[in-house]
Amino acid sequence: MSSHWATVTRVVTVCESTIIFIIYSIFLILLSKSTRIAQPFKIVLTVVGVHGLMYAFNIWLVLSAHVFHHGHFSVPLYGPLVNYLPKPLQDLSMITLTIFSYLIWQLIPGPCAMQYLALTRPQMSIATRLTLSYSITICYVVYDYFFVSQLVPTPEYEKIIQNTSREAFDLSPKERFIVYGLPFEQIPENNNRTCMTLALGCVMPTYCSAYVIFAVIISMIRRHLKSFGVKLSAKTMEMERTFYKMQLLQSILPVVIISFPIAVFIIPSVMSADLGPATLSMTFSVWLVPMVQGSVFLYYIRSSLRSQKVSQ
């Protein structure tokens, strides 16, 4: 008797992606109504909101899961629509989903850099500040692509991970899905590409460096606020501190949530462990992160609107 893990994945993922989409839709609507938030910060928050919407749509489109089984890491896509896309678009949907997932932490330095430049380089144009602030993220995305594209399997390897994905979740032969992935060790069927390269060459370096950059910029902002606090108006200082606290909160909370799925990904990659349906905990917790981040931003924008009403 086959299991219903594919159905469980579809149902839970549709629910999570819908919630994410609703949160960020409300956020962007409220953001458009706010007159209290400075233009540079509004742009930063718009970037966050657009990423959230696109991420939610991509999750809903592919309805993916994560599988670690018999020395292979695979990502089966159970979305009914993705099955009808041309192969290049199927590959693109997988690549963009992965990059959107990595952007959860790779976008974090951008708002901090934007805030720092707003404080220290007010004469600089918004476009220049925006470009400089997100240049790190752009570099991350380019860097990601060369690793993430390796998830697209060769035809020979695709047959292997089709079988391991079915076996891990005990799926019926009639269950249709597209699969991507990498082996833990080099095998000729996949041109010797491995999961270790993705885990240790892309995920860990970008994850760690993003938070190091975040910590450094936050430290610089704190020093600047302490040094020049007297020269800034009380309103400006309040806005800066509120945005600063929001940045801390939206960055620290995802660390707590995403550390588990990152560990689930890294540890089996190193140990070549079989986790079976337990890997769905990684899938579902990854989708929780944009919910948490979106909720933090939503709280921030609602607080801003309340302050706006009080001041009127």
Image (cartoon, rainbow, N blue to C red):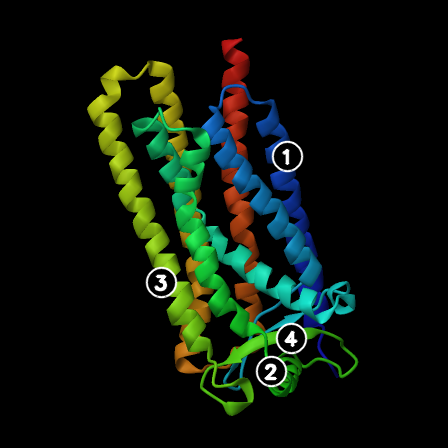
Dot 1 and dot 4 residues touching (CB under 8 Å)? no
Q: Mark 3 points at which residue?
A: 205
Disc 2 residue type (three-letter): Thr
Dot 1 and dot 2 residues touching (CB under 8 Å)? no
User: Nearer the viewer's eye, disc 1 or disc 2?
Assistant: 2
Is 128 left, or right, of 76 in this rendering? left
Q: Residue 173, relative to residue 111: is it above or below?
A: below
Dot placed on the residue nearer the N-terminal end, 4 or 3: 4
Q: For the residue labelled by badge 3, is the local secondary structure a helix, a strand or a loop? A: helix
- The spot of residue 137 in percent (x, y) is 43, 50
Q: For the residue labelled by badge 2, is the local secondary structure a helix, a strand or a loop? A: loop
Q: In which quarter of the image is residue 2?
A: bottom right
Q: Name the residue under label 2.
A: 154
Q: Please name whichever residue, 167 or 130, is drawn nearer the observer in this view of the structure.
A: 130
Q: How many marks?
A: 4
Q: Name the residue under label 4.
A: 179
Q: Residue 260, relative to residue 237: is it above or below?
A: below
Dot 4 and dot 3 residues touching (CB under 8 Å)? no
Residue at image point 60% right, 85% down = 157
Q: Mark 1 points at which residue?
A: 26
Q: Residue 193, relative to residue 39: is it above or below?
A: below
Q: Please name whichever residue, 91 or 275, is drawn nearer the observer in this view of the structure.
A: 91
Label 3 packing within 10 angstroms: few (<14), some (14-19), many (20+): few
Dot placed on the residue nearer the N-terminal end, 1 or 3: 1
Q: Separation of disc 4 and disc 3 at Cα?
A: 26 Å
- The spot of residue 11 in percent (x, y) is 71, 60
